[in-house]
Image (spheres, rainbow, N blue to C red):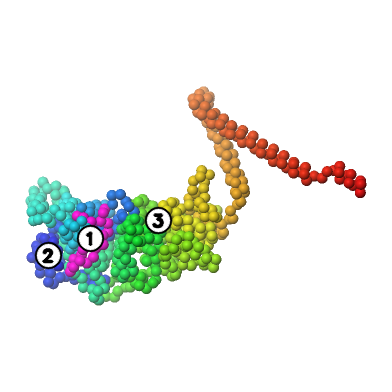
Amino acid sequence: MNDRTAGAISTIWTNPAAVLAQVENPQRRRIPGAYLRVVSGQVYTARLAPDPYNPRNADQVQFALAQPVGAPPATLALAAEEGVGEMGVRISSREALAEQLNWAIDMTRSRNSPHPSIEEQGIMDPPIGVATTVFYDDGATPTTHIFVREGSTRTSHALYYMGLSAEDVLFDLPRAAAPMQSHITKINNYADKPAEEITGSEKAAVRCATTDFELIIGVDPDIPGTVDLSQAIKARVAQDHLNPKKQWSNEARHASLAEECLIAAHTAQIISTDEMDWLGGRLTRTEASARKLVPHGDDRAARAVYLFTTNEPKTHNAIRQPIALILTDDQDGGGPRRRVKVTGNTKLPLAIELVARELHGAVSDTRLADFRKTLRDALPRDLSTRPWKPTRRTPQSLFEAAAEELANGEIGPTGTELWVRAAYILAKHGMISGARHDTGVGGDRRTPAAVIEALLESEAGLQHLRQVIEDDREGHKPRQVDSQGQPRKSAAGEDLLIDNAFVREVLAPKDGEPPMPLPPEAEASKRFKQATTTVKTRLRDLESSMRDLESITAPDGTPLIEKEGRNVAVLLRNNLRNMIDDAERWWEAALEAQAGTNEAASSTEDLDEPDTDQEADSGEAA
């Protein structure tokens, strides 16, 4: 342990001499697969910093990939063991660290309020923390802080009641003895006030001024090399949250575990540092491209899904290890351990949470929740047993290979890859949704996965899955295409977009093959009949509305429209006259067209009819 770290640790205790003896003979705390070495005692709460990367807030972190405005700059930086009993983390600057910690404190306090209140009771359960050295990309001198890894909620509330900011805790109070002494003097002055004069906020500051605390100073794994300090701390935090006062959300738990799995995959040399940052959402598409990574969202999603669902032994074991470590039930060192079965169903939600980081801060929480659920329901259920993996093929190449698989009567590796990529895009754009559980003509109880599987079984479906990927990569919303692969247009000349109704009712109807497209003339005739029916219905509605309008009378029985409706009547008259002019023009054009058709028909009949007189003469001659 270096002097900087030792100095930071030495100044947190209210009675350093009582703690010093523990350093040579530390306490041991059991975690799955190891023991933590800790020292404990009373500390000044003002010298503790809540975890800037509190896992409780993991589902609220805004990542570079989503390009949100005003996001904290140091989101989920990866901490690693720096030395004996010490962690290290690297971020851009001191300002970034302070901003991140302020965000974490505010977010933590807003999401969890301990009962009974910290204001009324102080910190009752000892927080747990570790010395962490922060290295700065801008060249500033590294700083060491005591980051709380379990108990950030309690510490955040306590700092609030003492009126301390992130800047105070990180830099101002540790700067020299004088600022800390001034803080202690202020608290003592509150405590020395007569009981009738001390305010509620001053009482809260006194109660929160000190707390019992456990400082982690090392780890002793059962098997050397299997559990490092970073993993041990996370396992300890997870233990305290198996039965929390307020449980982490599923999304927060998945986000935290997913991060650990990425680290494990990187450690096992399955993914590079750049790939870990790209899959973790810490790179924009431009940054990914500059690092020679495929910068498309569908490629990132496909690689995340594959990483967390494949049964390839090396990858599966690397991803499984952090999950099993956190979820293993180990009551004490000698007790039996309950092995957690880590399956595709266990791992897939973690991949989906990584994929969803693209949308953090860019869409509403409701929209984000819909995306997570839809993507989960749209992916194949048996991904872990399918022989597929992401490739660098173009959408056209994927389409051609999937069409070959279709001709052989199967959905093979390429079809599965096309399925995964398209499921992500359709879910992201809200163009496929869950089953309708009502009955009748409009009901469709198929899952999104069943619908996409049906798309893979027709050429039109494959064409649209290709189009979905091409359009999303070019920044377009996915469009409908015709049999030639060209975008379909509306009557106004606008592109027709894919939506859930089009996918379920046109491309993959629940009753089987989609209907064959009508010839252009028949399609036009069908639309004409539908439009004339609509006009007749609206005309009847207009007549009914006018009768209702006329039925509203004044006390003397006169219709109000005849007394007060001059402006309304003029507007209505002008609109009706315009419509009459249109109808008259249509009628005249239709008469001319019909007359031309009749004349053509008469001419044809004249040519086809025999000359009766000549036939009679010929008959007589014969």
Above/below status of 329 relative to 65: below
Which amino acid type corresponds to the residue marked 1 in the rendered image?
A: Arg
Q: Image quadrant of residue 247?
A: bottom left
Question: How far apart are the two marked residues, 3 and 2, measured between alpha carbons?
Answer: 49 Å
Q: Position of residue 80 (x, y in %)?
A: 23, 65
Q: Position of residue 149 (x, y in %)?
A: 22, 62
State the SS at label 2: helix
Q: Judge from the rendering whether residue 156 lies leftward or rightward of residue 597; answer left or right.
A: left
Can you identify the residue that label 2 sits on? 3
Question: How far apart are the two marked residues, 1 and 2, measured between alpha carbons?
Answer: 19 Å
Q: Earlier in the sequence, mark 1 or mark 2?
A: 2
Which amino acid type corresponds to the residue marked 2 in the rendered image?
A: Asp
Q: Which mark is residue 371?
A: 3
State the SS at label 1: strand
Can you identify the residue that label 1 sits on? 90
Above/below status of 522 relative to 90: above
Q: Is residue 178 visible?
A: yes
Callout 3–callout 2 Cβ contact below 8 Å: no
Q: Earlier in the sequence, mark 3 or mark 1?
A: 1
Q: Position of residue 292 (x, y in %)?
A: 35, 61
